[in-house]
DNA sequence: GTCTATACAGGGATAGAC
DNA sequence: GTCTATCCCTGTATAGAC
Protein backbone atom coordinates (compact mmCIF):
# COMPACT_ATOMS: atom_id res chain seq x y z
CA UNK A 1 0.00 0.00 0.00
CA UNK A 2 1.84 3.00 -1.28
CA UNK A 3 0.99 6.42 0.13
CA UNK A 4 -0.72 9.04 -2.01
CA UNK A 5 1.83 11.34 -3.58
CA UNK A 6 1.50 14.62 -5.43
CA UNK A 7 2.72 14.71 -9.00
CA UNK A 8 2.83 17.21 -11.81
CA UNK A 9 -0.11 17.20 -14.18
CA UNK A 10 0.43 20.31 -16.26
CA UNK A 11 2.49 23.47 -16.00
CA UNK A 12 1.74 24.87 -12.56
CA UNK A 13 -0.88 22.31 -11.69
CA UNK A 14 -0.59 19.47 -9.27
CA UNK A 15 -2.58 16.28 -8.95
CA UNK A 16 -2.57 13.63 -6.27
CA UNK A 17 -3.08 10.45 -8.15
CA UNK A 18 -0.50 7.75 -7.71
CA UNK A 19 -2.09 4.39 -7.85
CA UNK A 20 -4.89 5.30 -5.49
CA UNK A 21 -7.22 7.53 -7.41
CA UNK A 22 -10.04 6.79 -5.03
CA UNK A 23 -8.18 8.25 -2.06
CA UNK A 24 -6.95 11.18 -4.13
CA UNK A 25 -10.49 12.02 -5.22
CA UNK A 26 -11.72 11.92 -1.64
CA UNK A 27 -9.04 14.39 -0.60
CA UNK A 28 -9.99 16.65 -3.48
CA UNK A 29 -13.61 16.36 -2.41
CA UNK A 30 -12.78 17.48 1.11
CA UNK A 31 -10.89 20.47 -0.27
CA UNK A 32 -13.80 21.27 -2.54
CA UNK A 33 -16.26 21.30 0.32
CA UNK A 34 -13.89 23.47 2.32
CA UNK A 35 -14.06 26.03 -0.47
CA UNK A 36 -17.66 25.89 -1.61
CA UNK A 37 -19.65 23.97 0.97
CA UNK A 38 -21.34 20.61 0.69
CA UNK A 39 -23.63 21.68 -2.15
CA UNK A 40 -20.53 22.66 -4.11
CA UNK A 41 -19.15 19.13 -4.13
CA UNK A 42 -18.80 18.04 -7.74
CA UNK A 43 -17.46 14.79 -9.13
CA UNK A 44 -16.25 16.54 -12.27
CA UNK A 45 -14.36 19.22 -10.39
CA UNK A 46 -12.76 16.70 -8.05
CA UNK A 47 -11.57 14.77 -11.11
CA UNK A 48 -10.13 17.91 -12.68
CA UNK A 49 -8.22 18.77 -9.52
CA UNK A 50 -6.84 15.28 -9.32
CA UNK A 51 -5.65 15.50 -12.91
CA UNK A 52 -7.89 12.84 -14.42
CA UNK A 53 -10.80 12.93 -16.84
CA UNK A 54 -14.31 13.57 -15.57
CA UNK A 55 -15.22 9.98 -16.41
CA UNK A 56 -12.50 8.37 -14.30
CA UNK A 57 -14.20 8.79 -10.89
CA UNK A 58 -17.09 6.61 -12.02
CA UNK A 59 -14.80 3.58 -11.92
CA UNK A 60 -14.53 4.19 -8.17
CA UNK A 61 -17.90 5.68 -7.22
CA UNK A 62 -21.25 4.67 -8.65
CA UNK A 63 -22.58 8.23 -8.57
CA UNK A 64 -22.28 11.55 -6.81
CA UNK A 65 -23.99 10.27 -3.70
CA UNK A 66 -21.54 7.40 -3.33
CA UNK A 67 -18.72 9.92 -3.67
CA UNK A 68 -20.34 12.15 -1.06
CA UNK A 69 -20.62 9.14 1.23
CA UNK A 70 -16.91 8.41 0.96
CA UNK A 71 -16.00 12.06 1.54
CA UNK A 72 -18.30 12.29 4.55
CA UNK A 73 -16.81 9.13 6.03
CA UNK A 74 -13.28 10.43 5.66
CA UNK A 75 -14.29 13.79 7.16
CA UNK A 76 -15.83 11.96 10.10
CA UNK A 77 -12.63 10.04 10.68
CA UNK A 78 -10.56 13.22 10.61
CA UNK A 79 -12.96 14.90 13.00
CA UNK A 80 -12.67 11.94 15.35
CA UNK A 81 -8.88 12.04 15.20
CA UNK A 82 -8.79 15.73 16.01
CA UNK A 83 -11.22 15.41 18.91
CA UNK A 84 -9.25 12.51 20.30
CA UNK A 85 -5.99 14.41 20.07
CA UNK A 86 -7.49 17.53 21.64
CA UNK A 87 -8.99 15.59 24.53
CA UNK A 88 -5.75 13.76 25.13
CA UNK A 89 -3.82 17.02 25.18
CA UNK A 90 -6.14 18.71 27.63
CA UNK A 91 -6.23 15.70 29.95
CA UNK A 92 -2.48 15.97 30.31
CA UNK A 93 -2.72 19.38 31.90
CA UNK A 94 -6.06 19.31 33.70
CA UNK A 95 -8.47 16.91 35.34
CA UNK A 96 -11.38 19.36 35.17
CA UNK A 97 -14.00 18.01 32.74
CA UNK A 98 -15.08 21.59 31.99
CA UNK A 99 -11.71 22.09 30.34
CA UNK A 100 -12.50 19.11 28.14
CA UNK A 101 -15.81 20.64 27.16
CA UNK A 102 -13.97 23.78 26.11
CA UNK A 103 -11.52 21.74 24.10
CA UNK A 104 -14.32 19.90 22.33
CA UNK A 105 -16.07 23.10 21.37
CA UNK A 106 -12.88 24.72 20.16
CA UNK A 107 -11.82 21.70 18.16
CA UNK A 108 -15.22 21.32 16.55
CA UNK A 109 -15.46 25.01 15.63
CA UNK A 110 -11.95 24.95 14.20
CA UNK A 111 -12.82 21.88 12.15
CA UNK A 112 -15.96 23.46 10.78
CA UNK A 113 -14.29 26.73 9.91
CA UNK A 114 -11.45 24.88 8.20
CA UNK A 115 -13.64 22.44 6.30
CA UNK A 116 -16.80 24.53 5.90
CA UNK A 117 -18.69 21.52 7.23
CA UNK A 118 -19.09 19.46 10.38
CA UNK A 119 -21.95 17.32 11.66
CA UNK A 120 -23.94 18.48 8.65
CA UNK A 121 -21.46 16.53 6.52
CA UNK A 122 -21.02 13.48 8.74
CA UNK A 123 -24.78 13.21 9.10
CA UNK A 124 -25.76 14.55 5.67
CA UNK A 125 -29.41 14.44 4.79
CA UNK A 126 -28.82 12.74 1.44
CA UNK A 127 -27.12 9.81 3.18
CA UNK A 128 -29.47 9.32 6.09
CA UNK A 129 -30.90 6.04 4.78
CA UNK A 130 -27.65 4.76 3.32
CA UNK A 131 -26.94 2.38 6.23
CA UNK A 132 -23.24 2.55 5.43
CA UNK A 133 -21.30 0.96 8.25
CA UNK A 134 -18.07 2.94 7.86
CA UNK A 135 -19.93 6.24 8.02
CA UNK A 136 -22.01 5.10 10.97
CA UNK A 137 -18.85 4.05 12.79
CA UNK A 138 -17.12 7.36 12.17
CA UNK A 139 -20.17 9.28 13.36
CA UNK A 140 -20.57 7.04 16.37
CA UNK A 141 -16.98 7.54 17.39
CA UNK A 142 -17.33 11.32 17.28
CA UNK A 143 -20.47 11.19 19.39
CA UNK A 144 -18.82 8.92 21.93
CA UNK A 145 -15.74 11.10 22.21
CA UNK A 146 -17.90 14.13 22.86
CA UNK A 147 -20.09 12.31 25.35
CA UNK A 148 -17.33 11.15 27.71
CA UNK A 149 -16.61 14.51 29.38
CA UNK A 150 -20.29 15.38 29.74
CA UNK A 151 -20.84 12.20 31.74
CA UNK A 152 -18.07 13.31 34.05
CA UNK A 153 -19.81 16.64 34.51
CA UNK A 154 -23.24 15.19 35.12
CA UNK A 155 -23.57 11.76 36.68
CA UNK A 156 -27.22 11.74 35.64
CA UNK A 157 -27.08 10.07 32.23
CA UNK A 158 -30.16 11.79 30.83
CA UNK A 159 -28.84 15.16 31.87
CA UNK A 160 -25.45 14.29 30.38
CA UNK A 161 -27.08 13.55 27.03
CA UNK A 162 -28.88 16.87 27.16
CA UNK A 163 -25.66 18.67 27.98
CA UNK A 164 -23.95 16.92 25.13
CA UNK A 165 -26.58 18.15 22.68
CA UNK A 166 -26.43 21.62 24.15
CA UNK A 167 -22.70 21.73 23.50
CA UNK A 168 -22.80 20.28 19.94
CA UNK A 169 -25.55 22.58 18.88
CA UNK A 170 -23.94 25.62 20.45
CA UNK A 171 -20.60 24.94 18.79
CA UNK A 172 -22.29 24.13 15.51
CA UNK A 173 -24.29 27.36 15.67
CA UNK A 174 -21.25 29.52 16.37
CA UNK A 175 -19.32 27.93 13.52
CA UNK A 176 -22.22 28.01 11.06
CA UNK A 177 -22.93 31.68 11.68
CA UNK A 178 -19.22 32.38 11.39
CA UNK A 179 -19.26 30.76 7.96
CA UNK A 180 -22.11 33.00 6.83
CA UNK A 181 -20.02 36.00 7.84
CA UNK A 182 -21.98 37.01 10.94
CA UNK A 183 -19.02 36.37 13.24
CA UNK A 184 -15.27 36.48 12.82
CA UNK A 185 -13.32 33.25 13.23
CA UNK A 186 -11.15 34.63 16.01
CA UNK A 187 -14.22 35.71 18.02
CA UNK A 188 -15.98 32.41 17.60
CA UNK A 189 -12.91 30.44 18.65
CA UNK A 190 -13.17 32.26 21.98
CA UNK A 191 -16.96 32.42 22.36
CA UNK A 192 -17.82 28.81 21.61
CA UNK A 193 -15.56 27.29 24.27
CA UNK A 194 -16.79 29.85 26.78
CA UNK A 195 -20.40 28.91 26.01
CA UNK A 196 -19.51 25.22 26.35
CA UNK A 197 -18.01 25.84 29.77
CA UNK A 198 -21.06 27.81 30.90
CA UNK A 199 -23.38 25.05 29.74
CA UNK A 200 -21.25 22.56 31.62
CA UNK A 201 -21.34 24.70 34.75
CA UNK A 202 -25.10 24.96 34.51
CA UNK A 203 -25.37 21.18 34.21
CA UNK A 204 -23.02 20.52 37.10
CA UNK A 205 -24.78 22.92 39.42
CA UNK A 206 -21.59 24.97 39.79
CA UNK A 207 -21.62 28.60 38.89
CA UNK B 1 -51.52 48.99 -4.51
CA UNK B 2 -53.42 45.81 -5.15
CA UNK B 3 -52.61 42.73 -3.10
CA UNK B 4 -50.96 39.70 -4.68
CA UNK B 5 -53.58 37.15 -5.71
CA UNK B 6 -53.33 33.56 -6.84
CA UNK B 7 -54.65 32.73 -10.27
CA UNK B 8 -54.88 29.71 -12.51
CA UNK B 9 -51.98 29.20 -14.88
CA UNK B 10 -52.56 25.71 -16.27
CA UNK B 11 -54.60 22.69 -15.34
CA UNK B 12 -53.78 22.05 -11.69
CA UNK B 13 -51.11 24.70 -11.45
CA UNK B 14 -51.30 28.00 -9.68
CA UNK B 15 -49.32 31.19 -10.08
CA UNK B 16 -49.28 34.33 -8.00
CA UNK B 17 -48.77 37.06 -10.48
CA UNK B 18 -51.35 39.82 -10.58
CA UNK B 19 -49.73 43.08 -11.43
CA UNK B 20 -46.91 42.64 -8.97
CA UNK B 21 -44.62 40.04 -10.45
CA UNK B 22 -41.76 41.19 -8.26
CA UNK B 23 -43.60 40.36 -5.05
CA UNK B 24 -44.89 37.10 -6.49
CA UNK B 25 -41.37 36.01 -7.44
CA UNK B 26 -40.11 36.78 -3.96
CA UNK B 27 -42.79 34.60 -2.43
CA UNK B 28 -41.90 31.81 -4.84
CA UNK B 29 -38.26 32.27 -3.88
CA UNK B 30 -39.06 31.86 -0.19
CA UNK B 31 -40.99 28.67 -0.95
CA UNK B 32 -38.12 27.42 -3.06
CA UNK B 33 -35.62 27.92 -0.26
CA UNK B 34 -37.99 26.19 2.15
CA UNK B 35 -37.88 23.15 -0.12
CA UNK B 36 -34.27 23.03 -1.29
CA UNK B 37 -32.26 25.39 0.87
CA UNK B 38 -30.52 28.62 -0.09
CA UNK B 39 -28.29 27.00 -2.70
CA UNK B 40 -31.42 25.69 -4.42
CA UNK B 41 -32.78 29.16 -5.09
CA UNK B 42 -33.17 29.51 -8.84
CA UNK B 43 -34.48 32.46 -10.81
CA UNK B 44 -35.76 30.15 -13.54
CA UNK B 45 -37.65 27.91 -11.16
CA UNK B 46 -39.19 30.86 -9.34
CA UNK B 47 -40.40 32.17 -12.69
CA UNK B 48 -41.90 28.81 -13.62
CA UNK B 49 -43.78 28.60 -10.34
CA UNK B 50 -45.12 32.07 -10.80
CA UNK B 51 -46.36 31.19 -14.26
CA UNK B 52 -44.09 33.48 -16.28
CA UNK B 53 -41.21 32.87 -18.66
CA UNK B 54 -37.70 32.45 -17.34
CA UNK B 55 -36.74 35.79 -18.86
CA UNK B 56 -39.41 37.82 -17.08
CA UNK B 57 -37.68 38.05 -13.68
CA UNK B 58 -34.78 39.91 -15.23
CA UNK B 59 -37.02 42.95 -15.70
CA UNK B 60 -37.26 43.07 -11.90
CA UNK B 61 -33.92 41.75 -10.71
CA UNK B 62 -30.56 42.43 -12.34
CA UNK B 63 -29.27 38.93 -11.58
CA UNK B 64 -29.60 36.01 -9.20
CA UNK B 65 -27.84 37.87 -6.41
CA UNK B 66 -30.26 40.78 -6.58
CA UNK B 67 -33.09 38.28 -6.40
CA UNK B 68 -31.49 36.59 -3.42
CA UNK B 69 -31.15 39.98 -1.77
CA UNK B 70 -34.86 40.67 -2.14
CA UNK B 71 -35.80 37.23 -0.86
CA UNK B 72 -33.47 37.56 2.13
CA UNK B 73 -34.92 40.95 2.97
CA UNK B 74 -38.46 39.65 2.90
CA UNK B 75 -37.45 36.63 5.00
CA UNK B 76 -35.87 38.98 7.52
CA UNK B 77 -39.09 41.00 7.74
CA UNK B 78 -41.16 37.88 8.31
CA UNK B 79 -38.76 36.69 10.97
CA UNK B 80 -38.99 40.05 12.68
CA UNK B 81 -42.79 39.95 12.59
CA UNK B 82 -42.88 36.49 14.10
CA UNK B 83 -40.44 37.35 16.87
CA UNK B 84 -42.38 40.49 17.69
CA UNK B 85 -45.65 38.58 17.85
CA UNK B 86 -44.15 35.84 20.00
CA UNK B 87 -42.61 38.30 22.43
CA UNK B 88 -45.85 40.23 22.69
CA UNK B 89 -47.78 37.04 23.40
CA UNK B 90 -45.43 35.86 26.12
CA UNK B 91 -45.33 39.26 27.80
CA UNK B 92 -49.07 39.08 28.24
CA UNK B 93 -48.84 36.05 30.44
CA UNK B 94 -45.49 36.44 32.17
CA UNK B 95 -43.07 39.11 33.33
CA UNK B 96 -40.15 36.66 33.57
CA UNK B 97 -37.53 37.49 30.93
CA UNK B 98 -36.48 33.83 30.89
CA UNK B 99 -39.86 33.03 29.38
CA UNK B 100 -39.08 35.51 26.65
CA UNK B 101 -35.78 33.80 25.95
CA UNK B 102 -37.63 30.53 25.55
CA UNK B 103 -40.10 32.14 23.19
CA UNK B 104 -37.32 33.59 21.08
CA UNK B 105 -35.59 30.26 20.74
CA UNK B 106 -38.79 28.44 19.91
CA UNK B 107 -39.86 31.02 17.35
CA UNK B 108 -36.47 31.06 15.68
CA UNK B 109 -36.26 27.28 15.50
CA UNK B 110 -39.77 27.05 14.12
CA UNK B 111 -38.91 29.67 11.50
CA UNK B 112 -35.80 27.84 10.43
CA UNK B 113 -37.50 24.47 10.22
CA UNK B 114 -40.33 25.97 8.21
CA UNK B 115 -38.16 27.99 5.86
CA UNK B 116 -35.02 25.82 5.82
CA UNK B 117 -33.08 29.03 6.53
CA UNK B 118 -32.65 31.66 9.22
CA UNK B 119 -29.78 33.99 10.03
CA UNK B 120 -27.83 32.25 7.31
CA UNK B 121 -30.32 33.76 4.85
CA UNK B 122 -30.73 37.19 6.44
CA UNK B 123 -26.95 37.51 6.70
CA UNK B 124 -26.02 35.54 3.57
CA UNK B 125 -22.38 35.43 2.68
CA UNK B 126 -22.98 36.45 -0.92
CA UNK B 127 -24.65 39.66 0.21
CA UNK B 128 -22.26 40.71 2.94
CA UNK B 129 -20.83 43.65 1.00
CA UNK B 130 -24.10 44.64 -0.63
CA UNK B 131 -24.74 47.54 1.77
CA UNK B 132 -28.44 47.23 1.05
CA UNK B 133 -30.36 49.37 3.51
CA UNK B 134 -33.60 47.38 3.55
CA UNK B 135 -31.76 44.15 4.34
CA UNK B 136 -29.66 45.84 7.01
CA UNK B 137 -32.81 47.25 8.59
CA UNK B 138 -34.55 43.89 8.63
CA UNK B 139 -31.50 42.22 10.17
CA UNK B 140 -31.07 45.01 12.67
CA UNK B 141 -34.67 44.75 13.81
CA UNK B 142 -34.33 41.02 14.42
CA UNK B 143 -31.18 41.54 16.45
CA UNK B 144 -32.79 44.28 18.51
CA UNK B 145 -35.88 42.21 19.23
CA UNK B 146 -33.71 39.36 20.45
CA UNK B 147 -31.50 41.63 22.51
CA UNK B 148 -34.25 43.22 24.61
CA UNK B 149 -34.95 40.26 26.91
CA UNK B 150 -31.28 39.47 27.40
CA UNK B 151 -30.72 42.98 28.72
CA UNK B 152 -33.45 42.34 31.24
CA UNK B 153 -31.72 39.15 32.32
CA UNK B 154 -28.28 40.69 32.60
CA UNK B 155 -27.93 44.36 33.47
CA UNK B 156 -24.30 44.17 32.41
CA UNK B 157 -24.49 45.14 28.75
CA UNK B 158 -21.41 43.18 27.69
CA UNK B 159 -22.73 40.08 29.38
CA UNK B 160 -26.12 40.64 27.78
CA UNK B 161 -24.52 40.73 24.34
CA UNK B 162 -22.72 37.49 25.10
CA UNK B 163 -25.93 35.87 26.28
CA UNK B 164 -27.66 37.04 23.16
CA UNK B 165 -25.06 35.35 20.98
CA UNK B 166 -25.21 32.23 23.09
CA UNK B 167 -28.93 32.00 22.50
CA UNK B 168 -28.85 32.74 18.73
CA UNK B 169 -26.14 30.26 18.13
CA UNK B 170 -27.73 27.59 20.28
CA UNK B 171 -31.08 27.93 18.55
CA UNK B 172 -29.42 28.07 15.15
CA UNK B 173 -27.42 24.95 15.93
CA UNK B 174 -30.45 22.97 17.05
CA UNK B 175 -32.41 23.99 13.97
CA UNK B 176 -29.53 23.42 11.54
CA UNK B 177 -28.82 19.93 12.86
CA UNK B 178 -32.52 19.19 12.74
CA UNK B 179 -32.52 20.12 9.06
CA UNK B 180 -29.66 17.71 8.37
CA UNK B 181 -31.75 14.96 9.97
CA UNK B 182 -29.78 14.56 13.19
CA UNK B 183 -32.72 15.66 15.35
CA UNK B 184 -36.46 15.47 14.98
CA UNK B 185 -38.41 18.72 14.78
CA UNK B 186 -40.55 17.92 17.80
CA UNK B 187 -37.47 17.25 19.93
CA UNK B 188 -35.71 20.40 18.86
CA UNK B 189 -38.77 22.53 19.55
CA UNK B 190 -38.48 21.41 23.16
CA UNK B 191 -34.67 21.32 23.54
CA UNK B 192 -33.82 24.71 22.08
CA UNK B 193 -36.07 26.74 24.40
CA UNK B 194 -34.81 24.70 27.36
CA UNK B 195 -31.21 25.47 26.39
CA UNK B 196 -32.09 29.15 26.01
CA UNK B 197 -33.57 29.21 29.50
CA UNK B 198 -30.51 27.50 30.96
CA UNK B 199 -28.20 29.97 29.26
CA UNK B 200 -30.32 32.78 30.65
CA UNK B 201 -30.20 31.32 34.13
CA UNK B 202 -26.43 30.99 33.92
CA UNK B 203 -26.16 34.64 32.89
CA UNK B 204 -28.49 35.86 35.61
CA UNK B 205 -26.69 33.95 38.33
CA UNK B 206 -29.86 32.03 39.16
CA UNK B 207 -29.87 28.29 38.97
C1' DG C 1 -8.35 2.06 -15.20
C1' DT C 2 -8.27 5.68 -17.69
C1' DC C 3 -9.16 8.04 -21.95
C1' DT C 4 -12.21 10.77 -25.48
C1' DA C 5 -16.57 11.77 -26.94
C1' DT C 6 -21.16 12.37 -26.21
C1' DA C 7 -26.07 12.79 -24.52
C1' DC C 8 -28.75 15.17 -21.45
C1' DA C 9 -30.35 18.22 -17.82
C1' DG C 10 -30.43 22.55 -15.54
C1' DG C 11 -29.53 27.40 -14.52
C1' DG C 12 -27.91 32.31 -15.78
C1' DA C 13 -28.43 35.63 -18.85
C1' DT C 14 -29.39 38.34 -23.27
C1' DA C 15 -31.65 39.77 -27.95
C1' DG C 16 -35.36 41.09 -30.28
C1' DA C 17 -40.41 40.60 -31.19
C1' DC C 18 -44.85 42.10 -29.46
C1' DG D 1 -43.39 43.90 -19.16
C1' DT D 2 -43.52 39.83 -20.89
C1' DC D 3 -42.77 36.59 -24.57
C1' DT D 4 -39.85 33.18 -27.47
C1' DA D 5 -35.60 31.80 -28.81
C1' DT D 6 -30.98 31.26 -28.01
C1' DC D 7 -26.23 30.92 -26.03
C1' DC D 8 -23.05 29.46 -22.79
C1' DC D 9 -21.60 27.10 -18.89
C1' DT D 10 -21.44 23.35 -15.54
C1' DG D 11 -22.64 19.06 -13.85
C1' DT D 12 -24.07 13.88 -14.13
C1' DA D 13 -23.53 9.89 -16.37
C1' DT D 14 -22.61 6.43 -20.16
C1' DA D 15 -20.32 4.11 -24.39
C1' DG D 16 -16.60 2.46 -26.49
C1' DA D 17 -11.54 2.82 -27.60
C1' DC D 18 -7.00 1.83 -25.63
Image (cartoon, coloured by chain):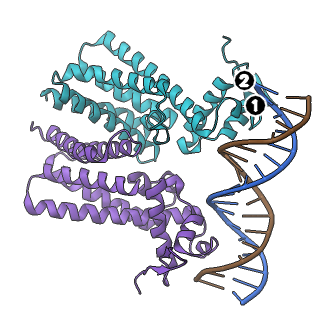
Chain colours: A purple, B cyan, C brown, D blue
Image side of residue B174 versus residue A161, left or right: right
| Residue in front for this viewpoint, A161 or A200 | A200
In x, y percent, where is residue B30? 57, 32
Position of A7 relative to B181 (above/below): below
| Residue in front for this viewpoint, B33 or A98 | B33
Q: Residue placed at 62% from the left, 74% from the top?
A: A53
Quarter of the view holding residue B152: top left
Q: Residue placed at 42% from the left, 51% from the top?
A: A120
| Residue in front for this viewpoint, A182 or A14 | A14
Q: Residue placed at 40% from the left, 17% from the top?
A: B84
Quarter of the view holding residue A121: bottom left
Q: Helix or strand or loop: what does disc 1 sit on?
A: loop
Q: Residue placed at 30% from the left, 46% from the top?
A: A171
In x, y percent, where is residue A174? 32, 43
Q: Chain of mark 1?
A: B
Image side of residue C1 versus residue B85, left or right: right
| Residue in front for this viewpoint, A84 or B28 | B28
Mark 1 and mark 2 lie on one chain; the one further toward the N terminus is 2
Which residue is under mark 1?
Answer: B51
Q: Helix or strand or loop: what does disc 2 sit on?
A: loop
Instruction: Estimate the spatial distance between the alpha carbons at disc 1 and disc 2, rounded to whole Å.
Output: 7 Å
Quadrant including the N terminus of chain B: top right
User: Disc 1, disc 2: CB below 8 Å?
Assistant: yes
Which residue is under mark 2?
Answer: B17
Quarter of the view holding residue B55: top right
In x, y percent, where is residue B182? 41, 48
Tell me the crowding category of disc 2: few under 14, some 14 to 19, or many 20 or more residues within 10 angstroms, Cα based: many
Amino acid sequence: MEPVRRWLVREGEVGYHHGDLRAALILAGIELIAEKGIAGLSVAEAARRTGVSTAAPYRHFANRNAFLLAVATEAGRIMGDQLEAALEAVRERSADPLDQLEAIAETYVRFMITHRAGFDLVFVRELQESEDQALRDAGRRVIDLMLAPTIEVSPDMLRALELNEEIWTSAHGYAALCLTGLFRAEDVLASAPRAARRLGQAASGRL
